[in-house]
Amino acid sequence: MSGASHHASSLNAEQVGYKQSLGRRHVQMIAIGGAIGTGLFLGSASRLNSTGPALLFSYAFVGVIAYFLMRALGELVLHRATSGAFVSYMREFYGEKWAFVTGWMYWLNWALTGIAELSAVGLYVQHWWPNMPTWQTVLIALAVVLVINLLSARAFGEFEFWASVAKVGAIVIFLAVGLVVVLFQMDVGGHKAGFQNLWSNPGGFWPSSGDYNWYGPILVMSGVVFAYAAIEMVGVAAGEMENPEREVPKAVNAVIFRIAVFYCGSILLLVSMLPTKEFKPGISPFVSVFGRMGLDWMGNVIQAVLIIAAMSSLNSGLYSTGRVLRSLGMSKQAPAFTLKMSKSGVPWAGIVMTSVVFVFGSVLNALRPDAFEIALEAAAIGVLFTWGTIFACQLKLRSLVNKGVIPASPFQAPGYPWTSYLGLAFLVMVAVGMAVSGWQSSPYFWHKVNFIVIVIGIPLLSAILAIGWMIVKPKVAANTGGHLGPVWTDSGPARVDPAPKQPESV
């Protein structure tokens, strides 16, 4: 057998057991829904309050970076669709060590995000049932998404489809109502709506005096990145799509349109309806606007959609981590039980492992919310790292294609290499912005959460991952016959991997 075919069998081994059961409507809605979550429905309130109408610029600029990201991911997926996603691509292009780091960083990101979303569900439910203990809500919410994920990939796809329908429906209703209110310059709680509010807002379009800083809209981009987090879910889902060659390009190309309409359209209408200081952190800006218009029932609908959005994020977290842990398990970089798979093609052991962490994290969050806030913010590092790996892998893939080592992907990203370089530079800027805004956020050192996450968190995580790699390295080396480097050199295949053992179905 040739070296290249050996590599193909080795890299594709982790796909054994998965069912290609996600159809066109699932993929389209996973792509839409992944980009719409609590970051828009809730997180935009504090950003509007602190930034002013220039937040529109922040969302638009990060939206362009997100599009570059999705085009880079699309090129990778059509080179090789795999449920191991970024982990598998890092293994192929940068070697086992970087696959280990990428997989555990992605898992950490989703584990911490899931804990935050579970805690959020508890708070949202208290809007209707103020006396319901948060721990009960946490267990019920987790049980629901756990059952859905353990059934099949198609069950996950169905839940995401209907959750996305609810999220998109709420935004479309708001856009329709908001457009009428703004175009006809109707009264919203004593304020005259209209596009003139973009510049007649206190401080103007880009406020820089008083409480505002001229660099505010640039610093706030770090928060906007996390509002867009999870759009990369299409990469993980590609391994279980019926026809990734057809669906991925459509889903990727539609991302820029959806960001423009759903995010930028919503922010444009919100700032045209009320002065930005009227939006209060912790209260959905959509609830604020509908409340001012006397449509309290619509506020209740948005509250329900917030719960759905948080459940959708939890659902995606379990789906992603189960598959990424199995990819790590295949190469001896995660415990062996993560390989276990059900007859319906679900890597159930990894999903259950993440669920256990969700429960413990939620308990800790309830007991020590202050201490846990730093851990939750650390999820941000995971998002930045994952996006960085996508750009880095696309750069390596294209350089190998240009040298004739690998056939060209049928869906190449435009603007190589500058779009990926710009993406990587932007991610570094976001990390610096997080440190700066974190330092400014409080006079007390231990309350400077984002500063601590960047300046202390990154070196600490690096040390933990370095120790982890030292522990697993002998097993990984034994599994690969001592070949820990990338699969390709600049002249062709680099190594011949032993055929991995087929994972068991349980």
Image (spheres, rainbow, N blue to C red):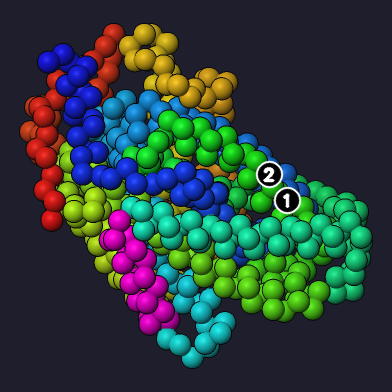
> Residue at image x 13%, y 44%?
503
Q: Is residue 40 above or below residue 134?
A: above
| Pointer 1 residue | 265
Mark linked to residue 361: none
Mark 1 Cα shell of 10 Å, populated few (<14), some (14-19), many (≥20): some
> Residue at image x 51%, y 79%?
125
Instruction: Judge by depth and name the residue closer to the eye, 394 or 502.
Output: 502
As helix, strand or loop, the secondary structure at mark 1 comes to helix
Q: Is residue 348 above or below residue 57?
A: below
Mark 2 Cα shell of 10 Å, populated few (<14), some (14-19), many (≥20): some
Figure quadrant of the N terminus: top left
As helix, strand or loop, the secondary structure at mark 2 comes to helix
Q: Is residue 436 above or below residue 272?
A: above
> Residue at image x 91%, y 53%?
196
- Residue 364 quadrant: bottom left
Instruction: Judge by depth and name the residue closer to the eye, 337 or 238.
Output: 238
Identify residue type, mark 1. Answer: Gly
In percent of width and height, residue 270 lies at: 76, 60
Q: Is 422 left or right of 235, judged from the image as shown?
A: right
| Pointer 2 residue | 260
Closer to the chain start, of discs 2 and 1, is: 2
- SS majority, magenta: helix
> Residue at image x 46%, y 77%?
122
In percent of width and height, residue 400 lies at: 37, 15
Tell me if label 2 and label 1 are in contact, CB under 8 Å: yes
- Residue 81 quadrant: top left
Stretch in magenta = 134-152
Is residue 139 one of those drawn in magenta?
yes
Is residue 316 one of those drawn in magenta?
no
C-alpha span from label 2 to label 1: 6 Å
In percent of width and height, residue 499 lies at: 11, 29
Identify residue type, mark 2. Answer: Ala
